[in-house]
Image (spheres, grey):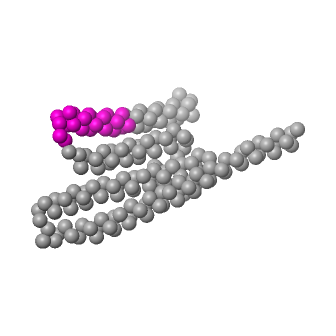
């Protein structure tokens, strides 16, 4: 019976490697989005070279300007989404498979790519997703036409909600940093015997 229990527990523990499908899939999706956004940047740059054309009317130049700004926002949105996929991929790997030695051992490594627990992964993903939502609202605001005073109220409410979300995110970061400092202080006091 002990042999079967060990065999079952070993199989159960090794089943975590199924997460590699999500890790590789997320990484490939992120690379694909990085590629698409970079191609968009190259096309945008080629498109923007026409901005200095003296034969453009003022109205055509304004339309080209608005189009370029809108495409820049789309590119930022694409890069942010690719970043979400990268963080998600690395986070799943660290949570289920193994720590990434280069992320923990190097002083030059970014702390955003170090994932310690599921809450850490959720927090980092939520911040990037919030940024994507802000960029998307900005993209819509560029082309938005306000025809009634109520449209202006809705627009102001959207900006206020974004400000509130950013404030709450910042406040939550402040509390978690204070909690970490308090836990560290208590841990040091216990070791010193005070």
* Residue 182 in the image, given as x and y percentages of width and height: 46, 32
Asked if residue 170 can be seen in this view, the reply is yes
What residue is drawn where x is 54% and y is 44%? 116
Name the residue nearer the viewer: 92 or 139: 139
**Residue lying farthest to the front in this orientation:** 147
* Residue 153 in the image, given as x and y percentages of width and height: 21, 33
What residue is drawn where x is 71% and y is 48%? 14
Q: How many marks?
A: 0
What residue is drawn where x is 44% and y is 35%? 176
**Segment colored magenta:** 146-170
- Please determine whether, in this image, residue 118 is positioned above or below residue 61: above
Q: Quadrant of residue 5?
A: top right
What residue is drawn where x is 52% and y is 57%? 27
Asked if residue 109 can be seen in this view, the reply is no
User: Is 153 one of the magenta-colored residues?
Assistant: yes
Name the residue nearer the viewer: 175 or 121: 121
Main SS class of the magenta portion in the image = helix
- Please determine whether, in this image, residue 145 is positioned above or below residue 62: above
* Residue 194 in the image, given as x and y percentages of width and height: 53, 28
Position of residue 104 in the picture relative to residue 163 (left or right): right
* Residue 111 in the image, given as x and y percentages of width and height: 46, 50
Name the residue nearer the viewer: 140 or 165: 140
User: Is 167 one of the magenta-colored residues?
Assistant: yes
Position of residue 87 in the picture relative to residue 43 (left or right): right
Name the residue nearer the viewer: 192 or 19: 19
């Amino acid at each position: 019976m002990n042999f079967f229990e060990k065999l079952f527990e070993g199989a159960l523990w090794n089943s975590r490697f199924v997460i590699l499908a999500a890790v590789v899939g997320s990484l490939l999706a992120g690379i694909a989005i990085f590629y698409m956004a970079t191609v968009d940047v190259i096309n945008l740059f080629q498109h923007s070279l026409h901005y200095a054309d003296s034969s453009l009317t003022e109205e055509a130049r304004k339309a080209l300007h608005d189009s370029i700004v809108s495409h820049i926002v789309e590119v930022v949105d694409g890069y942010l989404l690719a970043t979400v996929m990268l963080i998600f991929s690395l986070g799943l790997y660290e949570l289920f498979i193994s720590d990434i030695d280069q992320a923990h051992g190097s002083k030059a490594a970014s702390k955003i790519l170090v994932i310690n627990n599921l809450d850490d992964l959720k927090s980092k993903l939520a911040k990037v997703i919030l940024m994507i939502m802000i960029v998307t609202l900005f993209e819509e605001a560029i082309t938005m036409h306000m025809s009634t005073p109520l449209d202006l109220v809705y627009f102001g409410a959207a900006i206020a909600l974004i400000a509130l979300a950013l404030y709450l995110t910042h406040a939550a970061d402040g509390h978690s940093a204070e909690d970490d400092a308090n836990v560290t202080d208590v841990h040091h006091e216990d070791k010193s015997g005070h």
